[in-house]
Image (spheres, grey):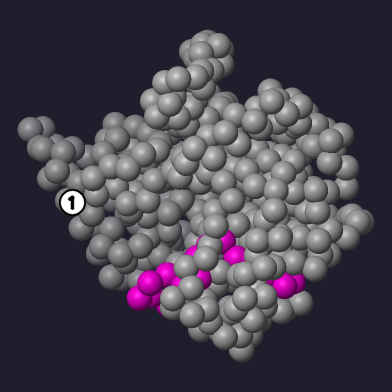
């Protein structure tokens, strides 16, 4: 059975709701938590919202004002608690945690949705009555996966039965499929395509509109446009929006620019908000969700500033400095703690690693700092990095750590940073360690 030793939660007493909207957000996705909760609670009076985060104490401190708004408008209907994230693929924790809030139904969704419908429970209960299944979802065509939006009778889905052979780094939708099968529940008919999104999916991995070869995009139907604009007229959203993270505010402006281009007959784009956000970012800079949590090369500068910067070009045979030794101890502890939790087969490669600790800990290995040579094309360096990553994976490597003092490596080579962001998954990012990527083929 899946057990997370770090799953320390707040025990609360909240009245029974018909449906619990349940999801999880790692540190990188925390800016979505407040907007998700406000939109879901505002539109669904029969619902409560429960969201797992990596560090609930820090989250509550950083978002105290926004949480006060939610408590005032939706008393006793929102729970933020801890969850297990380390060693688990980004979107999977929501399927491995069990809600604490008691309700007849549970709706497990994506944290980066803006819920814009108020009859979520009614839609899915009606669908369940048609299919005879105790849950409402559909199969992904030609794959052993259910979609990531799963409405279920709570007593039919929990307690979870996690397959003993499940690899925590595999696809989250396949995990859900396996969980449903492990409970002995039948699957939806292949012809059943019912699976409403209930709002706009503001995924940063998707394009706002259709684009050649881009795959799924943000759904922005006329109904969603009207619902989104109506939401801005409501006091809970207006007051909470004053405390949205700048990253989320920027994403909303991208959405509004998209909607404005689609409908030039009315004013949608908030120009004053764009000016205010620009001034804030230009003058104050970006304050990360937690120290050094973003994966972009620009944020790497902020992370590097939290630690004394060493020279990433030094020869690997050079005697390690005191800072290197400390880095090695930290990365060793990271690998050790991960191996004590739900992912016992973690092998961590450390960029620039050269400490004797690496030889004493089989879970930690060294990864070279590959610099761009004089006259070398970007594509050539990128291929060298990709080959080194593939060699690491072939040797059993599961994760790669870019320590804070080597963050300048990503800053100097943004195309390398883009490669890691697009082809692998950030699973941890802290000032004292750096960015940890889960490696995928």
Q: Is residue 59 above or below residue 335?
A: above
Residue 144 picture quarter: bottom left
The location of residue 209, given as percent across then percent down, is 36, 39
Main SS type for the magenta part? loop
Looking at the rendering, in which quadrant would you find the N terminus? bottom right
| Left or right of 245 on screen, residue 14 | right
Instruction: Tell me if residue 431 comes above or below residue 278 in the rendering.
Output: below
Q: Is residue 127 above or below residue 32?
A: below
Residue 205 on image: x %, y %: 40, 46
The residue drawn where x is 56% and y is 61% is 149
Quick one: 148 or 26, which is closer to the camera?
A: 148
> In the picture, which quadrant includes the C terminus?
bottom left
Q: Residue 139: within the magenta?
A: yes
Q: Which residues are magenta?
A: 138-154
* Pointer 1 local density, CA inside 10 Å: few below 14, some 14–19, many at least 20: some
Residue extending farthest to the left is: 375
Residue 398 position in % (x across, y down): 40, 65
Q: Which residue is mark 1?
A: 384
- The answer to whether residue 415 is above or below residue 270 is below
Query: Residue at the location (81% across, 65% down)?
Result: 103
Task: Give the side of residue 237 with respect to residue 218, left or right.
Answer: right
Whether residue 275 appears in magenta in the rendering, the answer is: no
**Residue at the location (52% across, 30% down)?**
252
**Pick the front one: 19 or 382:** 19
Q: Is residue 392 visible?
A: yes
- Pick the residue in front: 389 or 64: 64
Give the structural element (helix, strand or loop) at label 1.
helix
At a point 30% along the width and 70% down the height, the residue shown is 395
């Amino acid at each position: 059975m899946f057990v997370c030793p770090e799953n320390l939660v707040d025990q609360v007493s909240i009245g029974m709701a018909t449906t619990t909207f349940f999801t999880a957000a790692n540190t990188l996705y925390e800016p979505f938590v407040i907007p998700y909760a406000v939109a879901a609670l505002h539109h669904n009076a029969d619902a409560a919202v429960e969201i797992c985060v990596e560090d609930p104490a820090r989250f509550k401190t950083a978002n105290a004002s926004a949480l006060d708004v939610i408590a005032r408008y939706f008393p006793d209907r929102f729970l933020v608690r801890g969850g297990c994230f380390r060693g688990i693929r980004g979107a999977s924790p929501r399927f491995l945690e069990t809600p604490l809030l008691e309700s007849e139904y549970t709706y497990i969704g994506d944290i980066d949705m803006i819920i814009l419908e108020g009859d979520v429970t009614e839609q899915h209960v009606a669908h369940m009555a048609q299919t005879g299944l105790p849950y409402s979802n559909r199969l992904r065509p030609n794959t052993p996966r259910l979609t990531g939006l799963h409405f279920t009778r709570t007593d039919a889905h929990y307690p979870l039965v996690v397959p003993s052979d499940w690899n925590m780094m595999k696809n989250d939708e396949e995990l859900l499929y396996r969980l449903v099968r492990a409970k002995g529940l039948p699957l939806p008919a292949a012809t059943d395509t019912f699976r409403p999104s209930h709002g706009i999916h503001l995924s940063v991995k998707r394009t706002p509109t259709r684009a050649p070869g881009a795959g799924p995009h943000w759904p922005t139907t006329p109904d969603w446009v009207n619902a989104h604009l109506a939401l801005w007229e409501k006091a809970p959203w207006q007051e909470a929006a004053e405390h949205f993270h700048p990253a989320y505010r920027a994403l909303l402006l991208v959405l509004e620019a998209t909607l404005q281009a689609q409908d030039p007959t009315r004013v949608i784009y908030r120009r004053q908000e764009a000016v205010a956000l620009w001034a804030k970012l230009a003058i104050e800079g970006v304050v990360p969700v937690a120290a050094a949590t973003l994966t972009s090369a620009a944020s790497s500068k902020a992370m590097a500033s939290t630690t004394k910067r060493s020279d990433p070009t030094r020869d690997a045979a050079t005697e390690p400095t005191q800072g290197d030794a400390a880095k090695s101890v930290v990365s060793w502890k990271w690998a050790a703690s991960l191996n004590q939790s739900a992912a016992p087969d973690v092998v961590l490669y450390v960029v620039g690693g050269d400490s004797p600790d690496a030889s004493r800990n089989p879970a930690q290995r060294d990864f070279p700092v590959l610099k761009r040579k004089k006259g070398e094309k970007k594509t050539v360096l990128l291929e060298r990095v990709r080959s080194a990553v593939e060699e690491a994976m072939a040797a059993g490597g599961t994760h790669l750590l870019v320590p804070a003092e080597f963050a300048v490596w990503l800053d100097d080579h943004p195309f390398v940073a883009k490669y890691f962001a697009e082809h692998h998954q950030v699973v941890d990012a802290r000032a004292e360690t750096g960015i940890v990527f889960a490696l995928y083929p």
